[in-house]
Amino acid sequence: MSLAFAGGLRTHPEAGQSTKSDILPVAGPIAYVRAPEPTTGNAMIPLRFDFGKTGAMASIRCVIGRQFGAYSLRLDGLRVDNRFVPGASVLAQRWQALVFPLHGELRLDGERLGERRVLLAALRSLTSTGDPMPHVVSSDSELVALRLRADVVASPAQGARIASISPGTAEALRALAPCVKAGDLEAALAQTRAAVRALALDHILTEGADLPSEEPNGSLVARAVSSIFPIVSKLATKPMLVDVVARTGISERQILRDFLKVQVEYDLLDRGWRESLVRWRTTLAVLLLSVDRLSIEEIAALAGYSGPTAMGRALREAGLPTASAIRAGLREGAGVS
């Protein structure tokens, strides 16, 4: 699943400076600018997705704020290889991802991350559109991740690199995972703040890096989350907007407006219902291709396609190889053209 995470950070203000949450840093010499007033407030969103089937499942849990994002990803019987992860239409270079393996395997260019090491990567480099293109692989694993602004990373990665962390930072990242999985907004915020401060002490983030204040989700956020995001976990049922309308009683136009507004304000990966569904289906298909016991026909059905031909067309439109070539590449650990 594409490791593209929403969020950001600010630094501690100097003595005498404002501590309001709408004061954000800009890159370069110390300077502060007033951010535009948010229309949904500094609200946090808990999201959860479960894709696939028993024994071949990707479970994603997120707590996303306008100023930070914390994620838990579990791959049950699946392998993810960034060479075959579809790129997103909105993947700004200003974001970096920090990924910590709790269980299972995470490798960068063949090197396995140990207990006190993290992967730091430019977000685009974790997809097939990455430039430069490192080779990141994770199999049958559980990961916890943060999405960070590049201007608070002490040495932003060009592509991807491995960094060492202290025992205290490793413990803070481990403690973050259960909060995210439970969807506990306040606990996730507190543990993310603890992890960010620990990463600053390890000199991975800039000195004094911290999170601004965040609040429980507002009405607009709650409506969009409750109406649309749960449905996308059921790709095999070919979800349609009419299902969302029936679930909520809200008009299709209002649902699409709310959904897009949340995507823009929280800097999520996609823009719009159709674009989101297309990328989620393609990503799931690629993940399931790592499971040899599943036929191409089964994978197409689980990802919500009408058949292998439709899935092949979607892979091609995403700039990816054929299903058989992806499967061979995942199996052999070699690139395909």
Image (cartoon, rainbow, N blue to C red):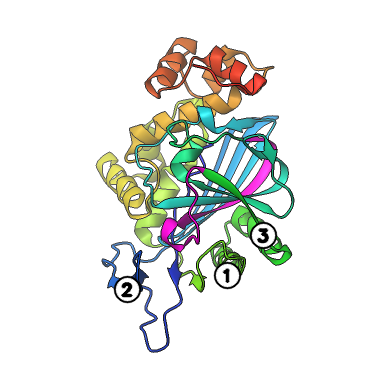
Residue 64 highlighted magenta (yes or no): no
Quadrant of the image for the N terminus? top right
Q: Which residue is mark 2?
A: 31
Q: Kindly identify the amino acid type of the residue bearing the numbered disc 2.
A: Ala
Q: Where, by quadrant of the figure, is residue 26 drawn? A: bottom left
Q: Is residue 111 above or below residue 291?
A: below
Which tag, 3 or 2, sits closer to the chain's start? Answer: 2
In front: 224, or 165? 165
| Left or right of residue 236, residue 139 in this image | right
At label 3, which amino acid type do we have? Ile
Q: Residue at x 53, y 15 (%)?
A: 323
Q: Which mark is residue 197?
A: 1
Q: Is residue 52 visible?
A: no
User: In x, y percent, where is residue 192?
Assistant: 57, 64
Which of the pair 321/263 is nearer the observer?
321
- Residue 156 position, x and y percent, is 48, 54
> Total marks drawn?
3
Number of other residues with Cα within 10 Å of mark 3, as a class: few under 14, some 14 to 19, many 20 or more: some
**First reached walking from the N terminus: tag 1 or tag 3:** 3
User: As shown in the figure, which amino acid type bears the numbered disc 1?
Assistant: Arg
Circle nearer the N terminus (1, 2) = 2
Q: Is 21 or 15 nearer to us in this picture?
A: 15
Gap in Å between the C-alphas at discs 1 and 3?
12 Å
Question: Cα distance, mark 3 to mark 2?
Answer: 29 Å
- Give the residue displayed 45% in from the left and 26% down from the top: 238
Q: CA distance from mark 1 to mark 2?
A: 21 Å
State which region is magenta: 137-159
Residue 92 vertical position relative to residue 308 in the rendered view, above or below: below
Identify the residue position indicated by label 3 in the image.
165
